[in-house]
Structure formats: C-alpha cells, structure tokens
Image: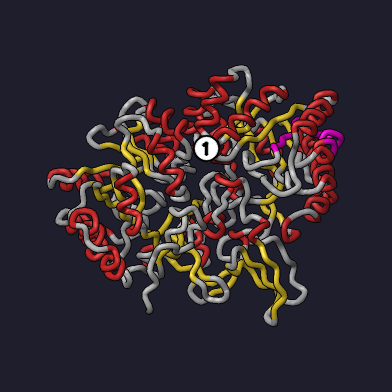
Amino acid sequence: MKLSIGPIQYYWPRSKMLEFYDWIVTQPIDIIYLGETVCAKRRELGLDDWLVLAGKLQQAGKEVVLSTMTLLEAGSELGAVKRLCQQQDYCIEANDMAAVALLEGRPFITGPGINIYNDRTLAKLVDCGLKRWVLPVELSRETLADMQAKRPDQVETEVLVYGRLPLAYSARCYTARHYDLPKDACAFRCLDHPDGLLLSTREGQPFLTLNGIQTQSASTCNLLSALTDMRKLGVDIARISPQAAHMATIISTFHDVLQQGLDLAVASERLADVYPVDACDGYWYGGAGMDALSIPRVAL
Amino acid sequence: MELVCPAGNLQSLKAAVDNGANAVYFGLRDDTNARHFAGLNFTAKTAHDGLRYAHDHGVRVFMAINTYPQPSNWSRWQAAVEQAAGLGVDALICADIGVMDFAANQFPELPLHLSVQGSATNDQAIRFYHRHFGIRRVVLPRVLSVRQVEQVVQNSPVAIEVFGFGSLCVMVEGRCLLSSYATGCSPNTYGACSPAKDVVWQDTAEGLETRLNHVLIDRYAEGENTGYPTLCKGRFEVAGKTGYAIEEPVSLNTLGILPQLQSIGVSAIKIEGRQRSPAYVGRVTRVLRAALDACTRDPQHYQPEPDWMAALAAVSEGAQTTLGAYDRPWQ
C-alpha cells in the first residue's frame, strides 16, 4: 500500500507551507496532493506557486496531484477550477462535480467530497475517466469491502487513515463569525489557527473543529488498526491529512506499520500524544464517526 | 414560478393541493428519501391515492429518492425507482449518480430532477447530470446569494428550483456529515439529520438539556424557547465564547425577494417541511400561493403582506426567519 499526503485543509502562512513541502520531499510518502480545497480567499499560495511546487516535488520523484476547491459559489471560483483543469501536466483530484464534468474523458481522481456510495456510481464515473477514488469518510469497512469486490479493473482506492474528518461546508465562515467579522473582511483569522478552532459542548466535550467554511471533527480519525484489513481488501493508498505538528511521528509510524510490520500496540503508543484533541475510528467500524472503537485509550 | 409543496402523508398532500400547490413531492416509508422519520411518508396504497388526488386537481407529483444507497441496500433504491415508474409520477428527485444511471437506463421516459442533496451549486456540475441522465431540473443548495443563483440560472441547461420557505440547512446539502459523526446516521445514508431515536430531553439542575447520542446540543434556561436539537443549531463553546457557533434556530423566508427570484428566471419555489403537520403545509402553501400570485400580477408593486409574514413567523424555527445565503448579512 502506498502512502499519500492529502491537501492541507488549514490556512498556513506561505513560509510554513513551503517548509512543509520541502520537508515532505524527504519523507517516505509516495503521493502528494496540492492546492487549496476549502476557501478561495486563502491565497498565501496561488496557482502559479502550486505549479512550481508541483514541479519540484515531481522532480524529486513524488507523484503529484492537484486538488480542486470543494464548494464553488462565485463565478470566479468556478473559473479557478476551469483554469486548474486546463493544465495537463498533473492529474487532478476533483472535489466538486464541476471538476468531474470538466475532466471527463481524461484520467482523474475524486476526493472524499464526491459521493461515491455504491458500485454503480463508481462504474459510471470510471466510464468518465475516474482512475482513483477516495472513500467518502462516513462509509464503513463493510461498504468498502462490497465496493472493492465489484470495483472495475485498474481503479485505485484510497482511504483517509489519519486526520481530522471533513464533515461539512457552508456559505458562511464560522471562524469569521466567531470573531464577529464579516466574511469579506475576515482578516484571515484562519492563519491564527493552524489546526482550526475547537468547538466544544457546554460541558466541555470537544466535538467539532471550525476551519473557515469547513467544519471538521474534533477527534482525529486514526485507522492504524485497520491497515492490515485494508491491505487484504485491496486498498491501494492510505492518506494522511496534514496537521500543524508531529507530522514526522505520524508519517514514520504509518510507514513503519505498512513497510516494516511495526507492532500495532507500539505504533498506537507512538501516536498517543500527537492528536490535537483525541482520536476516533467509528465510521470505519459502522458506528458514529466520533466513536473510538479500536483505539487504545492511553492515560493522559 | 411553480410552487412545489411538501407531502409527508396523504393529509398533507391534500392540504397542499387544496391550498394552491402546483406540484407536491413525497417519499416512501424508508431510507430512500431524506425525510425518513417514524410515522411519515407513503405506502404503495397512499402513494396511489395521493397521486390520483393531485392529478385530478391538475397538480403534478414528484417522488423523492434522494439519499445514497450502498451496495448492501441498493435493492431498496432500485425498487423505489421501479415503484415510482409504476405509479406514473411526474418526476423523480434523485441525488445519487448510480440511482440516476439506473433510472435513466431503465425508464428513459421518467423525468429526473437533481435533488438539493446532489450538491450542485454551479452550471458545470449541472451539465454533468444533464449530459448523462437528461435531468430536467435542479434544486439548488441553500448556500448561494441571489446574484449567484442568477449566474447559475443564466448558464444552466435546465430549469432551476430554489427553496422559498422552511427549515434552513446552512451546510451544503449532500455534503453534511455532522449527523453521522454524532450518531452514525446522516441524511446521505439514513435519510435524516439528528435522528429522533438518538435525541434525549432531560430536566437538570442547570436547565432543560437536549442531547444527541449523549452529546449536549443545547441547555435551556427557564422560559427560553426550546427547539429540536439539530446539530448545527445548538449552543456550543468556542475559545471561551458560548452561543450559536454555527447557526441560530431560524427558518428561511423568501417572501421579500420573490420578484427578484422571478426576474432572474427561477422556475420553481420549494417549500421545505415534509416532517411538518398538514396544518403547516396548508398554511404555508396558502401564503406562498397568495404571494406568488401577487408577484406575478404586479411584480413592481409587490410587497409581502404583514399577515403573510406573521403566518410564516408563527411556524418558523425559533419564530425567526431569515433570507439566509440569498442576501448574506454576514458577508
């Protein structure tokens, strides 16, 4: 199974993003997804910057994929997706059906925001050029197994194995709302929250993460314990979604389990301190997404 | 503009028809539609009776099969499409590509609408569904401004339907997993958000609490208005601030902008609320009918009547209404 790094969901300063990818080159990662997928106002890196970065990473031997925005509202956002889809040097991860429509007829990838919930949908999109799909995050191991059994030849399957779960997208920005700022004058407050803004219940239970117009889980999805099973199911790629810190530990742990058979208990312990809040794996096992069904609770 | 009204059961369907609906939409008693609530929706018999009642009164009937089947339960969605074709409904409202592919192949004469659960917010996405499945209409998610709706209308190859009144989803429909994160059931997979089976109300020393699968969604002080614990409308804490961090309990009301929606070329206005009572459906349909008629007669001088607004406020969440993303006061 290959390891990939998903697009950065948060808004990091330009220097931090460039540093991150300079460092990623040295890591045992096979595939790198680049681009802004959440908010069109996040322009620390523009399309030209992403393309330069893509060139460098490809030169260094990585497979590079360019990811599109997920929610398209303004005509200018659709225009940006069109420009992205016009370039031919890299494969594109479609995160909205607009991109699927634009990419039809050439090989493309769908991200977790494209609803492929059954084999008939998968087959239809394969007819359109789909060469790799990312399992929608709310689907279970059982559904994936059914899908894999009927998967058309030569389609690759990718599963998010580590990272906060993208759960919802809205027109309104909840980070700006928190600061009582209009969306159009948000002062780029997301830059102050490299792992998003934690939303807890009124009794202090961490619940969700506000990340601009995206809402994520508070808990970090961790499917370390399912990797062996995924390999048996023919999953091709395990995706790690970037977070602000501890990336070296996270990547090396997944790599060591996949490539060197690192003991799961040891691996889990290594990850015990890296979550911004906590970990979950409920969706995979068919439960509520926030449940932690196989993750050993390490005493804090 | 066509007025499309919710029918959670036969009584609601009749209330919609009797009060001026141009079309009604309904679903079956299972998870194949996005209002999968206990005691709601139609059996084969009531669907047949409802269809006849509507057609006898010149009202069209749409059937919602707008959730996302998985391989293990696919047969239920297939059966629903077959049932819809057998009934002779005027259109199917679908979200899933596989379902639309099946319907378009098996029943090419059956008109398809793309559900709001299909998350299409732009003309390119619409073009995909039009090209492959010949869809005739799209229901837009409640995230676009009037200007953005206009752009979609101008570039779309098919008719556009928008929400005119009812409970407000602030997240893009079809892409909101908040409910399954907390309960395992989402609109996509189960046909309901914040499902009632996971809701608990509890009186405590700190006030009346509502929980969804044990997660505290809200806590009400004495005398506060209470509401159903829809996840995105709860009160939470973010960096020391407690309040409605996502959305307030509020309903969408577009009476104030009907002439604009009409002039930009919107084809149909949808009322939300299959889960609401026949009395709600009757009242809201009557108000929207009167408003649409007034707007069609004389759009220049159209003004929402105070008693229309009062009637709608009375059935709104938190007794509040908003234009939501259409005018974006928070932009």
Please tell me which residue lies in front, B90 or A284: A284
Q: Position of residue B292 (x, y in %)?
A: 77, 36
Given the image, what chain letter belongs to the residue carrying mark 1? B
> Splitting the image into 4 quarters, where does residue B234 fall?
bottom right
In what element is the residue under mark 1? loop
Say whether residue B264 is left or right of residue A129: right
Is A281 drawn above or below residue B58 in the view shown? below
Quarter of the figure with the C terminus of chain A: bottom left
Q: Position of residue A143 (x, y in %)?
A: 46, 43
Q: Residue B151 lies in magenta, yes or no?
A: no
> For the point 34% across and 59% down, which residue is it?
A225
Q: Which residues are magenta?
A: B14-28
Count numbered badges in the picture.
1
Q: Residue B16 lies in magenta, yes or no?
A: yes
Q: Position of residue B155 (x, y in %)?
A: 51, 29
Which residue is most to the left? A60
> For the point 51% across and 47% down, which residue is it?
B175
| Residue B256 appears anywhere in the view | no
Is A91 drawn above or below residue B310 in the view shown? above
Please tell me which residue lies in front, A60 or A133: A133
Which residue is most to the top? B109
Please tell me which residue lies in front, A127 or A78: A127
Residue to which mark 1 is pinned: B120
> For the point 62% across and 35% down, which residue is it?
B65
Say whether residue A89 is left or right of residue B259: left
Is A208 drawn above or below residue B24 in the view shown? below
Label 1 is placed on what type of residue?
A: Ala
> For the point 61% across and 49% down, which residue is it?
B327
Mark 1 closeness class: few <14, some 14–19, many ≥20 residues within 10 Å: many
